Structure formats: structure tokens, C-alpha cells
Image (cartoon, rainbow, N blue to C red):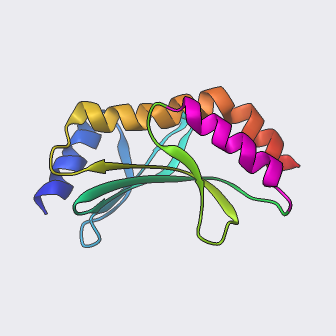
Amino acid sequence: MADFEKVKDFILDMGFVLSHEDSQEELIVIDDEERAIKNLVIDCEAPTLILEQVITPMPEGSSDFCKRLLQMNRTLVHGAFVLNEEGTTLLFRDTLQLENLDRNELEGSIDALSLALAEYGSELVSFARG
């Protein structure tokens, strides 16, 4: 439980409000409209911290866009745009090691999501609309 409490304290210290918390599953969900963060799941799965946010459903025949996502990934500071196991949903995902995790590292990962959405948001919305 120590890792979960440490992560929770970091999140609260950064000024985020928890929209959901499950201490049994050791996960937190946060929102921050100003940063375009919506339902960012932060999950302590020792030895790893997983950050994951749904971006948009993936329409059929999106292979050209998948190529574009790989190009976008090259520019991201942390994390990556990924597909769920079924290939039906685009997500942003990052993983960090819990053992040496500090506030700056976690904040950098969340900021990377926000920056990625700021930089590519309009392109992602256009894609989602078809």
C-alpha cells in the first residue's frame, strides 16, 4: 500500500482532484479539463505504475492513421499512443517504475499526455470524426 499512498500524495500535491479512487485495486482516476485530461487512470501494478487514458474509438480501415500515430509517438517525451488489445480504441499509455518514482517523474508523464493532446488534439479529433 505504500506505493499507492505515495502516488496518491504526489497527485494531490500537484493539485489534481481524484474523480475516482479504489484503494483495494490501488488505482486513481483524475480529470483536468484545462490539460485535456479526462479519466486518466493511474494504476499501481507493482513494480510498475501504469497511466492510461482513452483517446478515441478506432474506425475500420485506419491503417494510414496507425502509421501517423507511430510518427506522432516519435515526438512524445513520455508515453505513447497505443491501441487496446482488440484494436478498437486509441489510448495514451505510459509506464513508470514504482521503486524509484518521484513526483517530478510522475508530473512529467502527465505533462507529456497534456502536451501530446495539445499538439495533436485537432488531428486526433479530425480522425475520430472520419
Position of 130 compared to 116: left or right?
A: right
Could you tell me which residue is drawn at 24 percent across and 66 percent down?
A: 23
Q: Position of residue 95 (x, y in %)?
A: 37, 50
Q: Is residue 42 above or below residue 78?
A: below
- Residue at 36% in and 44% down: 17
The picture quadrant where one finds residue 88 is bottom right
Q: What residue lies at 73% left-to-right and 45% top-to-bottom?
A: 67
Left or right: residue 74 versus residue 98 is: right
Determine if the magenta segment contains residue 85.
no
Considering only vertical position in the picture, is 73 above or below 90? above
Which residue of the protein is positioned furthest toward the left in this rendering? 2
Q: Position of residue 110 (x, y in %)?
A: 41, 37
**Residue 57 position within the rendered picture, expressed as x and y whole percent measured from the top left:** 72, 59
Left or right of 40? Residue 22 is left
Quadrant where the N terminus lies?
bottom left
Could one spot residue 15 in this view of the protein?
Answer: no
Q: Residue at x 68, y 66 (%)?
A: 87
Q: Does any portion of residue 28 appear in the rendered image? A: yes
Q: Quadrant of residue 109?
A: top left
Extent of the magenta region: 61-76
Q: Main secondary structure of the magenta part?
A: helix
Q: Position of residue 112 (x, y in %)?
A: 46, 33
Question: Is 80 rendered above or below residue 43?
Answer: above
Residue 68 falls within the magenta-colored stretch: yes
Disc tally is: 0
